[in-house]
């Protein structure tokens, strides 16, 4: 792959993971990220099963990830009076290895910053593919919000569920992203204490938990709002939780002052073919399922397979992208399973009781854990 130039959009997990492999294989890699720098903190992500551990080992980061892992913590489900109703075991929420998203992004960035070019605070605005039949060398002409236009051999969209690359190369977001009836929010509210979770029909709030300091999930019709306006998003959250019991009034009072706030829909991405010409999708942009529990694993395994197939094909993108799609689509089927919103915020009191009952029955919980392990390892991992 020497002399192959690759532009990756997105510097969270999937993008830098791919950059790590492509740089090893000799490609010249540029990563562009809309945020002004690496996003610190964030919710925890997890890895489970032999496949994930194998890829982390081959990347050379397993030991560092383990050193910085948060460790799985049990979470107690309480009622409005604060009485325990169920315990969600740490191995369910945290997999085999749990780490803050920002810490994982930092590990990947530190391993790639010297071998790859990072451009922060910028975003792609257009993609125009050229090919040999036009009398020019094949490539993708890319324009940016701030930087001068450039041409790359390949472009990778690793920029999440709301992927700019997918929109520009494949079509409108509504053709590929399907809203699942819930929203979630993460907030820094300065709430100390144990990991607790509280439900009312159609809404959930958790504090001190393994995934985020304060975590909200609520059912809602699809909303229209500015994804880059946190003040507008805070108002949506306050409206959704008005009249709530337990500690909800105190938590809501802290929301306006939260310095770190994020709200988004719980949605599923469905893309039949991960590539269009010289443009290919990776991670959540191609097979995301919000809070589904497999996003980080799909990102690192997908990066390994995509880079490996490009290496094996000697940079022939048409062969490599086809093989990547064929190999990975069956594994990524797990992203089509389930709806985390229904699980975290059941729509009825009976649904809440049934969810809690499942965690109190070790046999049912054990069966569910075996199923998730099977999903995480359901691929014959190639050696490139």
Image (cartoon, rainbow, N blue to C red):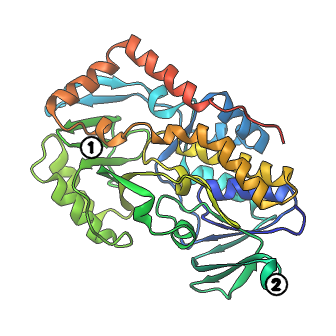
Q: Give the residue furthest to the top.
A: 363
Q: Nearer the viewer, residue 55 or 67?
A: 55
The residue singled out by tag 1 in the image is: 205
Q: Is residue 111 visible?
A: no
Quadrant in the rendering for residue 242? bottom left
Q: Is residue 215 visible?
A: yes
Q: Residue at x 49, y 42 (%)?
A: 335
Q: Residue at x 58, y 78 (%)?
A: 122
The residue singled out by tag 2 in the image is: 136
Residue 209 rendering spot, x and y as whole percentages: 38, 39
Q: Residue at x 66, y 33 (%)?
A: 379
Secondary structure at numbered mark 1: strand
Is 56 displayed left or right of 68 in the figure? Answer: right
Q: Give the residue furthest to the left.
A: 243
Cα–Cα span, label 2 and label 1: 56 Å
- Above or below residue 146? Residue 26 is above
Q: Nearer the viewer, residue 99 or 182?
A: 182
Residue 84 rendering spot, x and y as whole percentages: 24, 24
Quadrant in the rendering for residue 151? bottom right
- Above or below residue 90? Residue 250 is below
């Amino acid at each position: 792959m020497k002399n192959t130039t690759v532009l990756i959009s997105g510097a969270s997990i999937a993008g830098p993971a791919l950059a790590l492999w492509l740089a090893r294989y000799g490609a010249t890699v540029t990563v562009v990220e809309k945020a002004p720098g690496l996003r610190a903190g964030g919710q925890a992500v997890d890895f489970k099963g032999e496949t994930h551990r194998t890829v982390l080992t081959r990347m050379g980061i397993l030991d560092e990830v383990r050193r910085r892992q948060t460790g799985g913590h049990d979470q107690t489900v309480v009622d409005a009076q604060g009485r325990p109703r169920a315990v969600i075991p740490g191995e369910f929420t945290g997999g085999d290895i749990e780490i803050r998203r920002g810490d994982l992004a930092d590990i990947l960035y530190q391993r790639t910053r010297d071998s790859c070019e990072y451009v922060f605070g910028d975003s792609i605005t257009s993609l125009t593919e050229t090919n040999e039949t036009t009398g020019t060398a094949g490539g993708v002409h890319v324009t940016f919000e701030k930087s001068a236009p450039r041409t790359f051999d390949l472009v990778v969209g690793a920029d999440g569920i709301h992927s700019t690359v997918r929109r520009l190369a494949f079509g409108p977001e509504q053709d590929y992203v399907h809203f699942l009836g819930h929203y979630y929010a993460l907030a820094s509210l300065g709430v100390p204490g144990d990991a607790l979770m509280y439900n009312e029909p159609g809404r959930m709030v958790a504090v001190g938990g393994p995934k985020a300091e304060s975590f909200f999930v609520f059912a809602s019709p699809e909303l229209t709002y500015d994804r880059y306006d946190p003040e507008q998003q805070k108002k949506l959250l306050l409206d959704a939780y008005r009249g709530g019991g337990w500690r909800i009034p105190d938590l809501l009072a802290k929301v306006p002052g939260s310095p770190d706030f994020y709200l988004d829909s719980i949605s599923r991405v469905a893309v039949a073919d991960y590539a269009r010409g010289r443009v290919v999708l990776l991670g959540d942009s191609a097979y995301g399922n919000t809070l589904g529990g497999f996003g980080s694993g799909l990102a690192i395994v997908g990066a390994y397979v995509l880079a490996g197939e490009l290496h094996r094909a000697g940079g022939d993108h048409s062969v490599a992208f086809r093989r990547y799609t064929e190999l990975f689509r069956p594994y990524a089927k797990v992203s089509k399973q389930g709806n985390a919103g229904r699980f975290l915020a059941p729509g009825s009191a009976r649904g809440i009781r049934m969810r809690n009952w499942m965690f109190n029955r070790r046999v049912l919980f054990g069966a569910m854990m075996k199923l998730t392990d099977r999903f995480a390892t359901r691929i014959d991992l190639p050696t490139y």
